[in-house]
Amino acid sequence: MKYLLVLLLAGLTSTAQIQKEQLNLMPWPQSVVLNDGNFTLTKNFKVNITGNPNPRIFGGVTRFLRRLDGRAGIFFEQGFITKLNEVPNAELQINCTTGGKIGLYEDESYHLDIKQNKITINATSDLGALHGLETLLQLLQNNNTSFYFPNSQISDFPRFTWRGLMIDASRHFQPIDVIKRNIDGLAAMKMNVFHWHLVDDQGWRIEMKKNKKLIELASDGQYYTQEEIKNIVKYADERGILVVPEIDVPGHGSAILTAFPEIGSKVITLNGGISEKNIQGTAIATYGVERNAGIFSPTLDPSNPKTYQILSEIFDEVCPLFSGAYFHIGGDENEGKDWDANPKIQEFKKKNNLATNHELQTYFTMQLVPMLKKHGKQLMGWEEILTKNMSKEAIIHSWRGANEGMAAGQSLVDAVKKGYKTVLSNGYYLDLMYPVESHYLNDPMPKGVNLSTEEKARILGGEATMWTELVSSTTIDSRVWPRTAAIAERLWSAEDITDVASMRKRLDVVSFRLEELGLTHIRNRAVILRNIANNQNIKSLNEFSNVCEPLKGYTRNSGGTEYQMYSPLTLFADACTADAKDALVFNDAVNQYISNKSPENKAKVESFLNKWIAVNRGLNELSASAPLVQPVLPLAKKLSDASEQILLALNNKSTLKADDLRKLIEECNTKDHADVELAVYAGLKKLI
Amino acid sequence: MKYLLVLLLAGLTSTAQIQKEQLNLMPWPQSVVLNDGNFTLTKNFKVNITGNPNPRIFGGVTRFLRRLDGRAGIFFEQGFITKLNEVPNAELQINCTTGGKIGLYEDESYHLDIKQNKITINATSDLGALHGLETLLQLLQNNNTSFYFPNSQISDFPRFTWRGLMIDASRHFQPIDVIKRNIDGLAAMKMNVFHWHLVDDQGWRIEMKKNKKLIELASDGQYYTQEEIKNIVKYADERGILVVPEIDVPGHGSAILTAFPEIGSKVITLNGGISEKNIQGTAIATYGVERNAGIFSPTLDPSNPKTYQILSEIFDEVCPLFSGAYFHIGGDENEGKDWDANPKIQEFKKKNNLATNHELQTYFTMQLVPMLKKHGKQLMGWEEILTKNMSKEAIIHSWRGANEGMAAGQSLVDAVKKGYKTVLSNGYYLDLMYPVESHYLNDPMPKGVNLSTEEKARILGGEATMWTELVSSTTIDSRVWPRTAAIAERLWSAEDITDVASMRKRLDVVSFRLEELGLTHIRNRAVILRNIANNQNIKSLNEFSNVCEPLKGYTRNSGGTEYQMYSPLTLFADACTADAKDALVFNDAVNQYISNKSPENKAKVESFLNKWIAVNRGLNELSASAPLVQPVLPLAKKLSDASEQILLALNNKSTLKADDLRKLIEECNTKDHADVELAVYAGLKKLI
């Protein structure tokens, strides 16, 4: 009877009007109007498409139906949608005026209108319609027995035209299914650019039919075939996403130079012969695929005509694989050490009146412009390519900030003021494991800078970057998601959508829904923890991972040499993520307790402390037959010790001196354990 | 101090000699000798390869190193292995005399010798060496701080030469990554055949460059490109696995005939004109890709020369994609309805002296033999191809049994007695959701049949079959694994390795280790449950799924029409698996209690009953905002009601009559809820 009542009540609440704040939309649309009433989902639900869309809409709607049905379990009668105007009386009517083109500045707007018996999506192109379908999926509500959409009107369009994610497939190769599921995630978040970092010191990842040595010597057998690349471009196109490939030159050249040492800049002086007949000469250096992380000296020789011949051949083969209009040539972090040490290159600089290595690099980069233009591609590069003679057509990718001793995003302002288009990645570096809040509040439009309308228009948008020094195909999703969804909102939604608490609440739901697309950020945590626990119960490990975060910035792999590219990424830090789940909840509980020392508030705090004491006990038990748990124990013990003493202190039973207690808590702030840091340290500190 | 003691004790136990029964090897090797002492794993661990192996060994060893390091987290110094004799003093020395060829009758034996400071794998070919590496990985032990291999000598070879898994990629298309990870699983279980069921009524899955209509009209856009297929063949080859493709003809022809209705057998009589001038004629029937499950009439016309022309073209294009020597042409479940109704076909039968439809099908099949031979392929077909004029070179795939009203495996005996080679699949149908025990004890070598040595030799082995009517890419692994590992043991290990309890114990560990290869059978359960729970806590659902099993046999999709191929497979039954985790434990607890009614034994049983009462409560709470939980509630309530009353009865407090209690428990045996059945029913019944 009790349950019957619960059910009835739940049934009743369903008819209550949902409030805007309850919607878990992300990115938040430009305009949302909620009306009374609902559209209830039944098995008769069907979709009809009219207008003149690109055929990608058919697959898009078919996938939409499958996802909706997977959630609702209603057994829709409609299976595949392959034609225009197949079901004129369908409940969901989609109309697109024209076929969308994959690229920048497309009209991606849509209007979604939900009424009691009819849903309508009107969009200029299928690209907007696909966005509308994602919004519709996010609008799905339910009571205890059925699913429905709240009657509403949504008008929506993006704030920026470049809303991207970069994945580095060089440092840790990322198989095709990783790329596909991340593209699915981008589409769900209304993002439209996938930047594929395909070449770096740690490997060349593109099948080459002409210059085969790149694959044979510099890929460890891990590369994408040309057909796979074309399939990804098609897969992305079907989801409204532009693929921007990157081949990073002239620095980050270890892989390329492993295959073609003859176009490297390094010179080796040879001393041979016998004392009577001393022989001296120079020889070509040899290179190897880099196994460490960091900035390395292997750099292409800009004075060597063969460099341009090989690059031209490479672009001739690679460019046609991509249908988009942009090609990223990297250009970052070239320190020019090998240039300085090479007399031939010094001579070349003099001869060509190139005063600095920057000018030399500009000379080099400018040679690439026509190679790309030949294939209809515009050059893009990291901010270091921004020098005085750089072509105004180049897009400047702004990335440096405090970690590089620079003002954050300064290059973005410089670029637009000099007339360049630009994309922001500084502040969106996912590999640094910073909290989502920092990414969310990082606006591509700089604050406190006076920019003209034209200058502002040159800020194309932003791009989250997933560098993969410490990321495997098992862990990558947990670094990209759900944080990239918050970046997606920054790039799509209105400038004033900045309520962090609202974002966090919605992100929780979005994160859960991203699993539906095959993303593995939630499920794979258990996989790693099971491995660490050696097939024992993972409860304690999981709870501990809820208060630990991987070391931030570049501290986990200090010097870039602790981890080689083949080192295990199956450790506790790999199971942990930024924004540790319990940290925020605990810190809130502490704040509440401090402002009001009610028994309830105290109990909340105490339950955490007791949990952590139990976690420590549990981890010790686990560790008896799980060596990978050992590195976690010292930090767990420190947290447990501190928790015990704080519990006593909260109840005025502590025999410790205040200083000793403070010391105990301070101990929890060490960063020398298992590559993680304790995310509840701040909260603990407040308690004393 | 207490924990220190625990650690010390754990440290001590490590030096205790491990017993054979403690090893979790699967398939169990032919000979295992354990010696005193251990080989301890350190970061210096390296591998060296000598002899004359196929280069596949290099990738195999590199993957081995990565998996071992992933488990041990030791940061091995060795990254990639690419050459023979690179590290002559390596701890693990592998020697192979020759390069292994992918196919039947290869020498797959290996000798593994583990000593204090040296491990040696000697094998005729790299195929045996790869098996040896899998055994080595399974031998890994650990104490509290380190990993080691027990000193031992293992000699091993397979009992059968055909140890396969079939995946049906037609009914539910299975993306490339599903195929790859399942091939990884096969290799880990020392299996050597992947049978790829590529064409059936529900879809044509092979890119065709000539007869493009097959893809355009009969694939729903879901197919493998030719390059993807070649890559899979290569991927399988690198792991020692033969790929056997299947194009199912002449029955199961809906997809082919959707593209080419002109080679179908169905005739349509047309009546037209006006009453004064009656026009009658016949027309070609049209076909559509089938959306339901079952046996359908669309069948190729064996009397039509164009049938053979198209098939010949198809084989010319498809055969070269596969390097193996076998091609499966299906041939099953052709009921000949459309043949009987087609006058032209009846005439053809008469003209060619083909008395029955079976003879007509043999005529048809025999036309395919030279088409395949042209490409060096031998024909294989389901047992229906076994008719009197069938080529003796054909391999007979035995599949029918009680479900088809036949004696299990009868066709296997018939085949070998008639001189055919044969492979057994009857008893290995994974889609039927039967318990692992039934598969495990199903030996390809028939019991109680007098077979000569030659006849026995014609029994090549067996093949697990994964039909995908009710399987998505999210759930497929949980149907294939870990049960296929038990089948692998049946096909590899000695005939007398039949201890079910030992198999179950080892299977638990093997199942856990299969995650390392990327198999998703464990992790994806949580994904489905989270969807059902609508992002609420899945504890109750998970516990309930531990006592529920999907309906067995063909009862879940009664008539084949409840589920269309696009119906949701995100339901509770999809999260459940055969061999429900808690059922066996509960039944054991009941048996123990019945034989000894000690308080401890009683408490064990009671804890289950109390858990299920709590589960019902939990599910009701969940259901308030999770419609997909609703279908689960009636069964949960029945289990809870029965549990409550049994608890009372166990404590002599029940007020129910024995008959009423019996009735309550009987209610738990209904199969009309949420497509699952209660796996603890038998145990419950014993309690009264």
Image (cartoon, coloured by chain):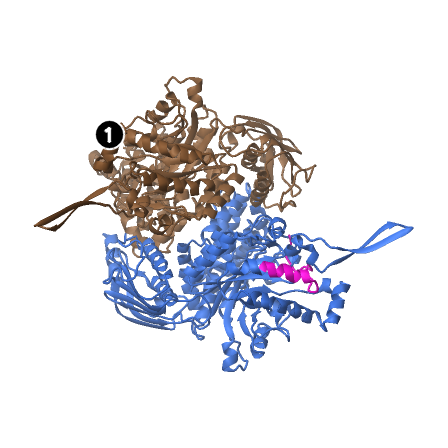
Chain colours: A brown, B blue
Q: Give the quadrant of residue A72.
A: top right
Marks counted in the figure total: 1
Task: Residue A519: tell me if it is visible.
Answer: yes
Per the image, the residue denoted by label 1 is A350
Query: What predominant SS class does the magenta segment belong to?
Result: loop
Q: Secondary structure under badge 1?
A: helix
Image location (x, y in percent) of residue A253: 31, 41
Chain of the residue on which disc 1 is drawn: A
Q: What stretch is highlighted in magenta?
A: B290-314
Along the viewing direction, whichever of A164 and A484 lies nearer the viewer:
A164
- On the image, the x and y values in percent for residue A416 come to 39, 23
Task: Give above or below for A135 relative to A560.
Answer: above
Residue B332: give x, y in percent of width and height.
62, 65
Circle 1 residues within 10 Å: few <14, some 14–19, many ≥20: few
Q: Can residue B309 be found in the magenta stretch?
A: yes
Q: Is residue A577 visible?
A: no
Q: Is residue A206 above or below residue A158?
A: below
**Left or right: residue A608 compared with residue A58:** left
The answer to whether residue A413 is above or below residue B676 is: above
Q: Which of these two is toward me, B19 or A283? A: A283
- Kind of residue at disc 1: Lys
- Quarter of the image for the C terminus of chain B: give it: bottom right
The answer to whether residue A543 is magenta is no
Establish if B386 lies above or below A50: below
Q: Which residue lies furthest to the right in this view?
A: B276
Residue A241: % across, % down:
49, 37
Q: Is residue B242 left or right of residue A412?
A: right
Residue A151 sits in which quadrant?
top right
Q: Residue furthest front?
A: A277
Q: Of B609 and A343, which appears nearest the observer?
A: A343
For this view, does B412 lie left or right of residue A554? right
